[in-house]
Image: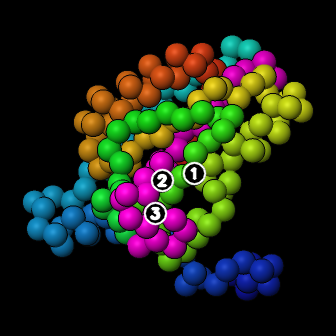
Amino acid sequence: MAKMGRGLGFAPEHDIAVSYIERSRGYYLAMGYPKSYDWAHMAEVPFTLLDKPLSEASLTVITTASLIEPDKGNQGPGAPMNPTASFQQVYSAPTDNPPELGISHLHYDRQHAKVADQRSFMPLPALQEVAAAGRIGAVAPRFHGVPTRYSHRLSLKKDGPELLVRLREDTVDAAILIAI
């Protein structure tokens, strides 16, 4: 069976994805923490069906990309890790004239994730095209950024509720999360 699969152009058996969960657990233990990182895993996901057709729905994007802040050093494509530019607050910005975004947070694969094309992590032009074609009702007036956190408490008790308030202010029906 393996030979048949290899003949179909599948990757070789040694070519496997990086296990970020195991990698992070090992990292925490190596750093001297008393236990490994406790990954969030919900037994039940609070999924809600849309109550209207997608062609009538208002959509937005939620991203972990950050607003470029020139006074905080290099944040553009290929920039090295930059803790100074790592943002810690939920933010919102207009979808009709979005600002330049960067990837300044500490925990993403800089070797393999080349982020030179902002559309790869902020697909507002594509979303606006499908709205113009009538496939979605509208693009919400704002998109939103959320910090990447290793704190479950901050994500669930601070960032999540704040983001929900903003989504409700914009009467958003659905959001696309693009986590980097």
* Residue visible at 63% across and 21% down in the picture: 173
Q: Earlier in the sequence, mark 3 or mark 1?
A: 3
Q: Amino acid at mark 2?
A: Ile
Q: Percent position (x, y) of residue 128?
A: 77, 37
Q: Are marks 2 and 1 in contact (CB under 8 Å)?
A: yes
Vertical arrangement, residue 167 with respect to residue 105, above or below: above
Residue in the image at 40% along x and 36% along y:
90
The residue to which callout 1 is attached is 100
Q: Position of residue 94 (x, y in %)?
A: 60, 33
Q: Is residue 38 left or right of residue 47?
A: left
Q: Which residues are magenta?
A: 55-80
Is 79 included in the stretch rendered in magenta? yes
Specify few, some or many for label 2: CA neighbours under 10 Å numbering under 14, 14-19, or 20 or more. some
Residue matched to label 3: 75
Whole-number angstrom distance, CA of label 2 to CA of label 1: 6 Å
For the N terminus, the image quarter is bottom right
Residue 68 in the image: x percent, y percent? 48, 53
Residue at left offset 57%, top offset 51%: 100
- Horizontal side of 99 relative to 161 (left or right) equals right
> Is residue 110 shown above or below 59?
below
* Residue, far right: 133
Q: Nearer the viewer, residue 106 or 100?
A: 100
Residue 68, disc? 2
What amino acid is at disc 3?
A: Gln
Task: Estimate the spatial distance between the alpha carbons at disc 3 and disc 1, rounded to whole Å.
Answer: 10 Å
